[in-house]
Structure formats: structure tokens, C-alpha cells
Amino acid sequence: MNQETIQLHINGKKFQIETEPNRLLLDVLRQDLGLTGTKRGCDDSSCGACTVLIDGEPQMSCLMLAVCYQDCEITTIEGVATLRGKDNELDPLQQGFVVEGGAQCGYCTPGMILTAKHLLAQNPDPTEDEINQALSGNLCRCTGYTQILASVRRAIELLRDPAWRDQEAQSR
Amino acid sequence: MSLDPALVPNSRNGSNSSLVGARIPMVDSVDKVTGAGKYTDDLTLPGTLVGKILHSPHAHARILSIDASAAERLPGVHAVVTGRETPVRYGILPVGHDETIFATGKVRYIGDNVAGVAAESESVAEQALRLIKVVYEVLPAYFDPEKSMQAETNLIHDDKPQNIEKEYHHHFGNVEAGFAEADYIRDDRFECAEVTHAALEPHSTLAKFDPDGSVTVWSSTQVPYYLMRTLAATLKLSEEKVRVIKPLVGGGFGGKSEVIPLELAAAVLARKAGTPVKITYTREEVFYAHRGRPRQIVELKTGVKRDGKITAVEARIVQDGGAYCSYGVVTILYSGQLLNAMYDIPNVKFDGYRVLTNKPACGAMRGHGTVNSRFAFETQLNMIAEVLGIDPAEIRRRNLLRPPCVTVNGLRVLSYGYPECLEKVVERSGWKRKYGKLPYGKGIGLAGSHYVSGAANAIVRAEMPHTTVDISIDRSGMVTIYTGAAEIGQGSDTMQVQVVAAELGIGLDRVKIVAADTARTPVDLGSYSSRVTFMAGNAAIAAAREAKKQILAAAARKLDTTPENLALEGERITCRDPAWRDLSLSFAETAALAVGSDEALRASGSYSPPASAQGGKYKGAGVGPSPAYSYSAQTAEVTVDPETGEVKVDRVIAAHDCGKAINPLAVEGQVQGSVWMGLGQAVQEEMVWQGGRLMNPGLLEYRSASTLESPPIETIIVESNDPEGPFGAKEAGEGSLAATIPAVVQAIHDAVGVWITSLPVTPEKVLRALEEKRRREELSY
């Protein structure tokens, strides 16, 4: 198959690569760009481990041709921490997953965090049901989800902290 | 990348008392939440080829010929390997060396490994697989263990008559006398469907050969040491030429606790291609690689006195083991041996059959061997309690062990928090208010379970410790732990950092860990049978104590006193004598003194289970003994829709006796994960087979629960302080799984009045049972 030049906007940076037009975004991220934080857990959009944000919306990169997303802003897990204003500070969701045990083996964690990030951007004070609903496309085999929910709740608490809100405002 | 230190307890100035029992985040968690952590498939080396495996399309067939010449000629293909080049037999158990890297002569299940290719891209590799011409002579196949046991011809393995991998017949005490003494005897048949680990990370292996013929293998494994040995044996290399490195592992649950064919295939392809090869399984391949919990049929007979006291237990257990031995001999033994060590049972008889069938091999899965037997036993105990009109919690109280004790089959029990677990869940759940009193369609159930804290007898009988941990301290006072123990997401690394920091009285940030690299770290047998905290934890403590001795000796020389007069806490060495209280040294400066002219201070600690924990001397006695057993009691509450048969689990409360929760955050996570996996087996998960073909090889089809099907799981930690455990700790990662299933089954009975004895409890089974109940009730009018 012929190579094409494509441009991708990922985590605030521009990338230009030569690739076949039939490549999955997941494979381009992992194999061409070394952004291996995005995981492959299945081959059929069952598990959500490959979730990335496309213009802020969570989508499964194992279902997407990279060539189709050249006009979008793509966020992977590697871009979550630096998206905040302060130097290399972890995102409240990342902090929540660390301190509440939301990451055991860690394989579903990037997808979980990105999905939760979209949820909290839309709804800073979700109910238990709303969190469950939002995360239902991201499978975990380790935790039974209890500590993942606690992690998200911890992030919500951190986000309520005025210091975080100021930073958020500054970074916009 | 910084984490707000206020969120992490005791990261600095740790002292023994504050670190043990603190909720410590995993030491690798920042890597995991930022995507920086590397799993095997995240690694690549220059020139790495894609490896792919050709799988058998037949369940049982003789290979008449293989022609790989067209595949070899395909541009972009660098190596093709078939069974002719891989004749060495291997297997995880010394008694079960029945596999080869690629099939030699016969294939034994759909998915069996026939050939491997290494190519420049995935698409070329797949094209090459299609070009390999294999001529098969299809043989009759066996899919049902009870039928397979009747086989006389076309045996799956020629040296296993009747397709029986192994059978055991144990009799302890006198069951005939026990049943004669009983006032009530029950006989039931239970069936448990086959389930699998489905860790979220598919198996992956990267192999690289060096010009001197040595090989480095990065692999998603729970057992780096066994993998190193098996690579050496099958590739005919000496062990020094093989290095296994375990990167982050995305979940194991037993599915990576033995050598999986791709791990050897990647190496053999890399050797032939002369360049690195990586194989990562597709999700479908992961399902066929399997090694999960076998389908099990339990015929169970229990006799009790009128007061519920058990007089005898007799079990006939048949396991559908699949086409190779794997851990099967151990699985069938556990299923009988661990009927004991939970309750006081004076007479026990066990007939166990591990049967070969033409399906992927079953192996070890969380709660290895105990789960299905425990489901049957606890369910039958609840049935008996109902008939006798005894409360399910009370019938358990009447059958408790009285530790310290040795069971009839030779299992030594020292710490026993089960009674407390029972009381705690009864109280928290409102059991007395609810059991038998909830409205129709709502129910509550109760059950217990237990598990080993590591096997007291190693798989490989060799004169070496089960685990060794080394520590080095450099002159700046940085401590490095070298351990073979395999972090698989359960917290192995964190546990060792925590106990070493606690023992040395230093902060967590002063301790680094190098783990699971067979060229750099001492031998540990692996992460299976819940052995790591107990064994590597004890070894880490021993190593830290040895290091502490050297530190205190150096401080004593400097301060002109004796080590006994010194204390090490909060990163300072101080005199115990109040008069000399202001004389003190920092940990770092003392480390420099202790290191002296050497490169670093070194200390080592090992652990092997004591002889008194190693069990009896009869055939099969080696499986079941453990230095300590964890205990769990649980209640489950359900809603059953009598119109649809649907079961919704509303709430589970699990009290787990882990001896001592060194890290409650990790213990809770392990218990919740176990309970959740038990729920999956109870009401959702099942491998559905048709003619040796898996009908549901995907995570959705397999019905792995999402947040929407997962109820809140409440944990209660019970601490029985095991006399031999590290800081009193026992296992926490497996023992809670088994109790969940019978607790749910009893809750269903409490809700709608039917006992379901076949797993998983599907709506169809509930409806059928309700229909039968209705008919019976109509007939009796």
C-alpha cells in the first residue's frame, strides 16, 4: 500500500509521519510515535484500554484510522499531566488513582483516566450512577471497580479545591 | 512528575510503627497513571520482527506433513519454525512434561501450536501463516470429561490410559464410621463451568539473541525463574545463557503463572532469524492460551449430627483438564486437600480425577483448585443448615477448628481469624434482621473460604530457599532491594519497599527496588499461590535486619557504645539511654561509615517454610500444606426477578483474615478484586465450547462485568497476627474469591426458594428451577 504523509495534533504538539492509510490510530500512536501509554487490550472495542480523547471526547483508537483524525486535537495519557498549567503536576484524576489504589496492574488505567477526564469536564459533580455509566465502556479485571470509583471521587474532591480551580483558569 | 506529598502517608521519616499498616500507594503507580510505565508490548528493539503462530484448526489430529517452503520464500519472512526443530518436552510440573513448543506428530486442541513465523510486518507474517501447508488426519476427539474417561482408543496422550492425567484416592479417618454416626446425610452433584483469567494485558514476549548465543527475554510472566529454566531446557542452553526480564505485567490471576507457548516461540524464532522477535497474542489467542479454571463436577456427601456437627465428608471430583497437564495434578489435589483446614472434619474421603480432553489446557487460576470445591461444600452446608433449622452462621460456629492444630490430612493451622470474620459480616450485614425475612425476590446469603499463603513445598524439589532478597546500601544511604519476586499489579514491589523501610526505620523514598530480572536478582519462585507477601516479605525483613545489624555496629563504633544501646528510627540512630539522648547520627552518615572502603553495604535474607508446615508423607501430601492460611467470610445480597430469572447482586461484605494488613489499601484492593472475580464466576462468566471451538473468545462475549454490573464491595480486615508471617501477615489476593459464589447462591435461595447447583447462575437456570419448584408444589397439593 502507498505511503501517505499525515499530520496529527497530539497533546499540543504537531507530528508529521509517513504511513499507509489503513493504519489504526492505536498502532500509529504506539508503534510510530512511541506513545505506548495507550494500550491494546482486545481487538474489537470491547475493553476501552485504547481510549484517547478526540477534541475532548473519549474514543477507542483501535477502531479509528489515523488518517481520518488529522484535523482533530488528540489527547493521550501522556498529555494529561502536562495539560495543567503548573510544571509536570499530576492531574487530579492521576493523583486520585495513585492514592486510592485505582491502578493495580495499571493496564486499563490510561483509558479509565481519559474517560473520567471527559466526564468531569462535562459534569464536575457526577452522581455514583453517572460515574458508573461513564466508565462502563472501560473494563478492569483487577479492582472490581471499587477503588476506581474511590479514585474518581478523590479527584472530584481535589478539583473542588480552589487552588486547582485557579490553575485551571490560568491554563486556559 | 510530582505527587502532592500530603496525599501520601509516611513517605518520609518512616518509622517501624507508622509504615506497617499505612495506606501506601503502589510504588509504580505514578508510572501507571502517566503512561510512562512499560509493559512488554511497549518495548521494541531495532530490527524487531513480528512473530505469529499457526494454530491447529482441528481438536485432535495427526500431522501427516508440513510444507513451509512457500512461507519461507515469501519476501519479508525471516524465519519459519515447526515442531521438527522443537522436540524438547516441557511443562510446569516435573510430572507433566507433555508439551513441545510446536506440535510434534499430533495436535490436541483447536488452537494448538503448529508453526511459527517471524516477518517484517504483521500482514506479511499472517500471509506467511496462510502459505504453510499442513496435511492432517483428523482423529476422534473428546470434549466431555466423563466420556473421555471411558476412552480406549485414540488416546490424547499415549501414556495416559482412559485419558486420565492423574487420579488420587485419599481417605483420612473413617468415613463409613462417620456416616454411620450421622443423623442427617446429604448427597448433591455440583457443576462449575470453565472460566478464564482474561487479564487485560494480552500475553507478550520479546526475545533477543546476542552473538555469544545468550538470549534475553522480556515477557509478561508471573514466573520469571521458571521461564528462564524452561527456555534453557527447550532451547538447549545453559541457564547462565538465559536472562528473563519481567517488565510491568497487566494482570495475571494465574494465567501467566506457567510458561505460555509464545514465550518459547519468540525465542526460537529470534534465534533462527538472528534478530529480535516479538509476539503479542490477539485477544482470541489469549482465550485459547487459557490455563484457566477447569470445568469441575463435584459429587459431595456430607454427614452431620442433629446439632450440625460434621461427622464425615466424601467427595468425588472430576476436572475437565484440557489437552495438556499444565498445573492439573496440583489443581486436582488442591480440590480435595483444601476441603480441610477450614472446619473441624474428622473423616474425609476424596476421589479426584484429572481428565484430558481435546480443549486448551486448564491450569492455575486465582483460588487455584479450591474455588469449585468450596462452592460445593459451602452450598451443601447451607442446604444442611436449612433442613436442620440452624442459622448458617451458627452451623459454621459449631464446626470451627481449634488451632493450633493439624488437620486429618496433615495441614498445620496456627492463626485462624475465621470466627472473627463470621461475627464481623453477621454484624455489618444486619444478617439476623435479614436472613429469611426479606420480601420475595430479595435475599441474603453467607459463606466462607480460605487459601494458602504460598505452598510449603516447591514445584521444583531443589535444595534452595523458596525466595531470597538482597539489599545494598550505598554511602549516601540509598537502599536498593534486589528481588526475584514478580510484581503483577498485586503490590509485590510496594510490599517489599514498605517492609524494608519499616525495618530500617527510614522513609519510602530512600528505598529503590530492582525486581524480576534473572541476571540481576536472586531466585524467587514466582507470583502464584499467594506466596509473595509471606515468603518474599519474610526474606526482605531478614535482609533488612541483617543490614540494620551492620548499620548499628558502625554507629556503635562511632559513638563508642554497643549496638544494643542504639535505636534506628525516623532515619536517625539514637542512644536508648536517656542520658545520651542528644548523641545521634543520621542514617545517611552512618551508612557511609558502615560502607567504609567497600562499594556498598550488602545484606541478604531468605525464606523457606518450616518442616512443621510441610504436611504428611502420603502420595499427594505435598499439595495443600502452607505455612499459613487466610480466611474469609462473606455475605451477599441479591435481587432476583422471578419473571426473567435475572439475578442482580446488590451488595457484598467480605471480612478477610490476612493476618496483618501491612498495607490496608492493597489488601482492600486484593479482596475486592477477588470478590469481583468470584461474582463473575457466580453469575456471568463461562467459556462456551462447541466441538472444541470456543464460542465466546472476546471480552464482551465472555461477559466480563463492567461498572454497571459490579456492586459495591465492602471489606473488613481481620488481623489474626500469624506467628510466622511478616509482621504477622498472610495472603490477601485469592482467599476471598471462593466464598463469594456460595454466598450469592444462598442469597438466591433466600430470595426465591431454589438452590442452583450449576455455575454460572444464568437466568435460564433460575427460571427452570422456579418452574420445577412450581410443578413440585402443584403435585403436592
Image (cartoon, rainbow, N blue to C red):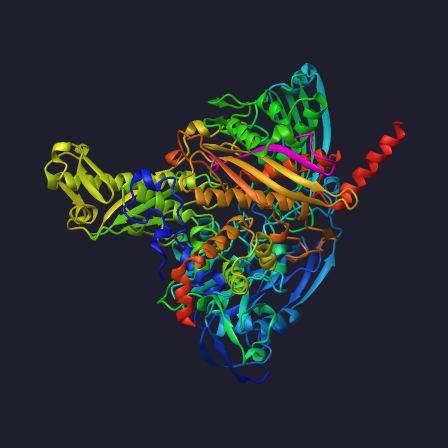
Q: Residue B466: x percent and y percent?
A: 41, 40
Q: In this view, does B567 lie to the left or right of B461?
A: left
Boundaries of the magenta span:
B435-456
Instruction: In the displayed orientation, state which residue is furthest to the left.
Output: B560
Vertical comparison of B141 with B408: above or below = below
* Quadrant holding the C terminus of chain B: top right
Vertical comparison of A53 with B61: above or below = below
Q: Residue B99: x percent and y percent?
A: 58, 51
Residue in the foreground of this view, choosing between B212 and A4: A4
Residue name at image x 62 percent, y 47 percent: B362
Residue in the foreground of this view, choosing between B46 and B375: B375
Q: Residue B583: x percent and y percent?
A: 12, 40
Please check the rendered image and state whether residue B436 is part of the magenta-colored stretch, yes or no: yes
Residue B775: quarter of image = top right
Residue B125 appears in the rendering: yes
Residue in the foreground of this view, choosing between B96 and B499: B499
Vertical comparison of B34 with B637: above or below = below
Q: Residue A141: x percent and y percent?
A: 56, 52
Q: Is residue B387 left or right of residue B455?
A: right
Q: In this view, does B417 lie to the left or right of B143?
A: left
Residue name at image x 42 percent, y 35 percent: B660
Count the marks: how many? Answer: 0
Residue in the foreground of this view, choosing between B74 and B2: B2
Q: Is residue B336 left or right of residue B386?
A: left
Please check the rendered image and state whether residue B206 is part of the magenta-colored stretch, yes or no: no
